[in-house]
Amino acid sequence: MTDVVATNETILVVGGGISGMTAALEAAECGKQVVLVEKNPSVGGRIAQLYKYFPKLCRPSCGQEINLRRLKVNKRIRLLTMAEVTNVDGAAGDYDVSITIHPRYVNENCTACGACAEAVTAEIDDPFNYNMKTIKAAYLPYNMAYPQRYVIDPSIVGSEDANKAKAACKYDAIDLDMQEQTIEIKVGAVIWATGWRPYDAAKIQPYGYDRYPNVITSVEFERMMDPFGPTGGKLLRPSDAKEAKSIAFIQCAGSRDRNHLTHCSRICCMASLKQSTYIGEQYGDDADAKATIYYIDIRAIDRFEDFYKKVQADEKVHFIKSKVANITENRDTGDVVLHGVDTEGYHRYDNTHDLCVLAIGMEPSVRADQIADNVSADASGFIQMNGAGGAIFGAGCATNALDVNRAVQSATAATLRAIQVVNRVSSAEA
Amino acid sequence: MSENKTAAYVCKGCGIGDRLDTDQLAKIAESEGKCSLVRQHDFLCNADGVNTIRNDIEGEGVTHVVIAACSRRAKTDAFGFDDVALGRANLREGVIWVRPDAEEARETTQEMADDYLRMACAEIQYMKQPAANQNAGTNKNILVVGGGVSGMTAALEASKAGYGVLLVEKTGQLGGWAAKLYKRVPDREPFADPQDTGASDLIKSVEHDKNITVFVNSSITRTSGAPGQFSIDISAESGETVTENVGSIIQASGFSNYDANQLPELGYGKSPDVVDQAELEQLAKQAADGPIKRPSDGKEVESVVFVQCAGQRSDKQGHLPYCSGHCCNTSIKQAMYFKDSNPNVDTMVMYDDLRTPGNGEDFYRSAQRKGVSFTKGKTHQVNPVNGQLEVKFHDMILGEDAVAKADLVVLATGQVANSGVDIEQATTLEVEDEDGQSEATAEADTSEVQVPVESILNLTYRQGVDLPHLRHGFSDSHFICFPYETQRSGIYTCGPVRRPMDIVQTMEDATGAALKAIQAVENATLGRAAHPRSGDLSFPSFRREGCTQCKRCTVECPFGAIDEDEQRYPVFNESRCRRCGTCMGACPVRVISFENYSVDTVGQQIKTVDMPDEFDEKPRILVLACENDAYPALDMAAQQGLEYSAFVRIVPVRCLGSVNTIWVTDALNSGYDGVMLMGCKKGDDYQCHFVKGSELAHYRMSKIDDTLQQLQLEPERVQTYEVEITDIQRLPTLINEYVAKIDEIGMNPFKGF
C-alpha cells in the first residue's frame, strides 16, 4: 500500500503540468507539505509536448529542467503518478480526498536502463505523440520523463511479452502483480491544476479533420518538429509523408464559435505565429515554403505585439483575414483546398495547400462542476473563482485559456490562496 | 570542526560492471582519490545499496561521499543525502552509454571512467557541506509600493496569510486608476455587462486590516539591505521621514496614461470632445446612470467613435510599439455606458485587431447584441468641423477611405509603466581590466534627451536605484516559465508595471507576487537561496587580503547583490545572492568562492585528469557545460545511445558566467588540447536564468584569445557555444567535430611540461 503522510495542513495539488508543478514547488519552497497528484506516468503535462515557446522561441524543457531539479531536492513534495483524485469531501481546512493509483507494474528499483523495452515486442499508440506513432509496450514516456522510470502498458500484462520484460530486468523492478489501489488522505486545501485539452477537431465538420489526412491540429504539428517525434523533426504530411511546404493555419478552430467553444482560446494566434517560424527553420530560403494564416483578429496581446511584428516582416508568412468556410481535398494529390472569402476587399478564394493546421481551441480537461460541490464553472467549464468553492482553488488552464506565463502566474496566486487556508489551520491549532 | 572522511561507492549495475574494470576504479578512489572507504555494489540505488551508504554516514562518520554510478540528474531519490558533501562520477550517461561496447574502445572508455572518478574525488575534497548564512535577516514584514488595485491586492493577500504589510502610496488616497473608473469589465458569468469596480470595497478592506499599515502622500526615498533585512526610508510630502525594516518588497507602481497630447492628428487638444479612455470614465461618472454629455457644450452625446490603438502598436516616434491589452475590452465597456443608458446612441469601435481573449469574447458578443458597431479601419485624422468631429479613416474591409461623424471621439491610448529609472541608461559602469585600465562596459545613451524620472525604490545598490527594465520600460522578468524570476532578490513587481494588463490579470499577478514575497522572507530567514537554485545554503565568501578592488564582481553580478565599501572592496549581501557564481567567474585574482562550488572544486577536477603524453595520440578536451541545458542534453544523448569521443572530460558548471578564465588557461597549460564552453543563448531573447552568464563567458573568452596568442596557441583551442537543452543530437556531433578539428591542429605543445 502506498504510504502518504498528509494532514489538514497539507496542500493537495491535482495535476503535474506546468501549473501544478509550479504550485507544488512554490508551496513547498514556502515550507508547506504538498501532495502532488499526476494522472500520467510522468510530470510535465502539455508543455513537455511543445517544441518551442512563444515569443522567445526558447525550449520548454529548459524551464522543466529547473522545475525538476527543484522537485528532486525538495523533500516536502510527495509525488504520486498514475494517480487520480476520485473524490473530494469536506470544507476549507478539512478535506477528505480519495486518490486512485493505477499500477505502473514497475517499482522504484527501475534504473531506466531500458532492458525491458528491448525485450518486449508489442507496440502501443504513443499518447505523448498524440498517437501519431507507436512505441514499445514497456516504455519511458519521453526523454525527460520524471520519475525516470519505465511503464508497462496494462494491455500486455498477463501476456508472454510482459513475462519477457520481467525476465529482462536485472533489478527486480517489474512487478506484474501490482494492483490498482485507492488511498484516503486528509488535506487542508486543494489546488486544482488539471489543465486543458485540445477541442475535438472532428466536431468542426466543414474542416474535415476526420476525413482528410492532411488536416491536422496545432498540437500535432508541434510534435512533428521534435527530432524524436513521429516524423523525426521533419514537416512530413500524413497522407504521403511528403514534405509539407505550403502550410495553412486556420485560426479560431473551435474557438469564438457558438457551435463549439464560445470563448477565445487566447494562445492560438501566438501559437500559429510561432509555428509559422518553423517553416523558415525547416526550409531556409526555399521559395516554395510559405505559411498562410487565416484569421479573424490577430490577438498578439500586450508585449507579444513585438513578435507579431517580427513575423509580419517575414516574407514567408502571409495573412488572410477570413474565417475559412470549408476545406475540400484534391483526391489526386492529397492537397487540401481552403474555401472562403477574404474580408479585406471581399475576394473569394479557393487556395490549395500541402497541409492545413487547425489552431485548435482549449477546453478544460476536467469540467469545474465535476470536481466537487460548490466549485462553479463558467460557460466553457473552466473553474470560476467566486469564493464559493471553499479551499479548492483553480490554477492555470483549469481556470481559463491561458498561455504558459499567465498559467504560472495563476498557479502562483493559487498557491498563496491555499497557504492562507493552511496557515489559518496551523494558527488555530497552535 | 571534525575531520573529513571520504567514502567512494562504485556501482556495477546498468552494465557498468560489465563494461568497466570496477576494481581498478576502486583502487583509484583509494590511492589517488584518498578515499578511506571504498565499496563496490552490484546495484547501488536499491534499498541495500542506499542503506550501506546511510550506515557508513551514521556509523563510520563519513562526511564526503563519491557515488560512481549514473548521472547526478538520475536516481536523486535514492542518492539524496543532504547531510554530506556529495560528488557524482557519471559512469553511465557520461561513459558507457556514449561509448561503443567494442574491444577496441575498451581502453579509452576505461580511461574516461577513471578520470571521472578522479574528478569526483577531487571535487569533494574541496567541497564543504554549506552551513547557512549567519547574517540572515529575520524580518517577515512586506513592503508594498503603490496603493492601486495591484498594491492593495498584494497587501490584502499577504495579510490573509498572516504577514504584516506596509503599504506606501504616493498620492493622497488609495485606489489608483480603478477608483477613477465608473465601472469595470466583468470578471464573471455571464460576462455581459460592466460591473462595479470593487475599488471602494478593496480600499475599505485595506483600511480595516490590522496587519496593514498605510502611508499615503509618501514615497520611498531609500532602500538598502537584503531579503529578510531591508531598511527603507518612507518620506511623506510634508518632509517627515520614517525608517522601517521589512523582509521583502512588492513594487506595484502601476502605469501612467500615455499622453494623448502627442496625438494632435487624432484631434486631441484641438477639441475638448476628443478624450482618452480615462477622461471618458470621468464623464461617465459625472453622468452616473444618465446620458453622457460632451465636454464642449454639455450636449448629450448621440454618436461616439472609439479609436483603438491610438498611439499604440505603432513604430512612429513617440508612439508605443506594444499593445496595451485591456483597451479593446475597455472601449466595449465604454460603448455599453452609452448603449445601456440610451440604445439609440450611435457607438462605433474602430479597430485593427479586436483583442478580447478568454471570456472577453462573451463581452464582445454582448456588445454586438447591444448594437455597438465594429469597423475594421485605421483612423488617420480627427478634425472638429461645425461643432462635430469628423473621423477620417481607411475602411479595411471595403478598401476605401471614409469619414464618420461623431459628437465625441474616445482615443484608446496605452499604458506606460511607472518603472522608475532605467538604470542601464542612467549609469556608466566602469571596471578595471587586469592592467588597471578603465573600460566602459555600458555606455550612457546620449542619443536621446532623457526626461528626468523619479526613482521608485531609491535602492542604494551599486548597480542602480531601480529594477532593471526590459523592452519598452516594463520591469523585470521576461521568462515564460518564471514570471517572477526577479533580477533583484526579494523585490517583486506586479501589475501594469510589469506588462500592460487589465484588472483581472493585475489581481492574479498581485496575488502571485505576494506569494513570492512571502517565500522570499521565509527563505531568507533560513539562509536559503531563491529560485532557480532554490534551497542552496551556500553563499559567496571572499578573501579580502587578495582583493584588488577591481569591481568586476560588483559590476557583473546579474542580481545586483554586491555593493562596495568606501575602499571599493566588495560587500556581499548574501541574502540577495542567487548562487550562480558569476562573481567567482569574474574575479581575476580568484578570491571569491562558495563552500560547495569554488575555483578549486572545478579547478582540481581539471588538474586531476590523467594527461597522456603527446605521443599517445589521445587528446584531452575539457568541456565546461551549463548544468541546466548542456549537461541534461548530454545525458539525454546518452539515453538515446548517441556516441561521442572518449577524449572529452565534461564538467558541469552552475552557469557559464561562473567560469573563471584560470580554469581555461590552467587546462591549456596542463596539456588539454582544447576547451569547449557550452552555455545558453545570449542576446535579446537570452535564455540564461542567471541573465548574462553566457554573454559574459563569450566576452571573457574573447579576451582569452590574446592570452592564447601570447602562448602561441591557436584560437580554436578555446571555443564557446550557445546550446539548448534540446540539442540532444547536436552536442555529440559538436564534440566529435571539435575533436576532429583538434586532430587537425595537432596536440597541445604544452603537454608534459
Image: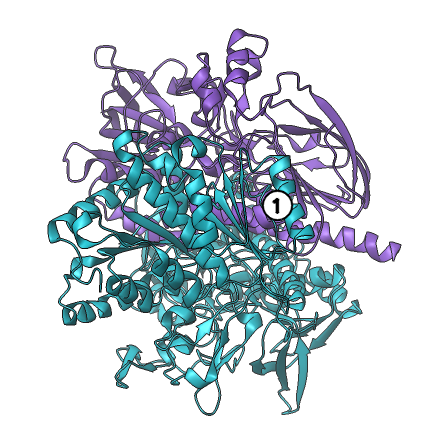
| B249 left or right of A150 in image | right
- Is the residue marked by circle 1 packed among few (<14), some (14-19), or many (20+) residues within 10 Å? many
| B93 left or right of B1 in image | left
- The residue carrying mark 1 is B53
Q: Amino acid at mark 1?
A: Ile
> Front-most of B534 and A87?
B534
Pointer 1 chain = B
| A315 left or right of B606 in image | left
Which residue does the image show at 34% across and 69% down from the upper left?
B264
**In the picture, residue A89 is in which quadrant?**
top right
Which residue does the image show at 57% across and 80% down from the upper left?
B223
> Front-most of B441 and B347?
B441
| A119 left or right of B495 in image | left
- In the rendered view, would you say B59 is above or below A220? below
Which chain can be seen in cyan?
A: B
Q: Colour of chain A?
A: purple
Q: State the residue lying farthest toward the right.
A: A429
Q: Position of residue B107 (x, y in %)?
A: 29, 39
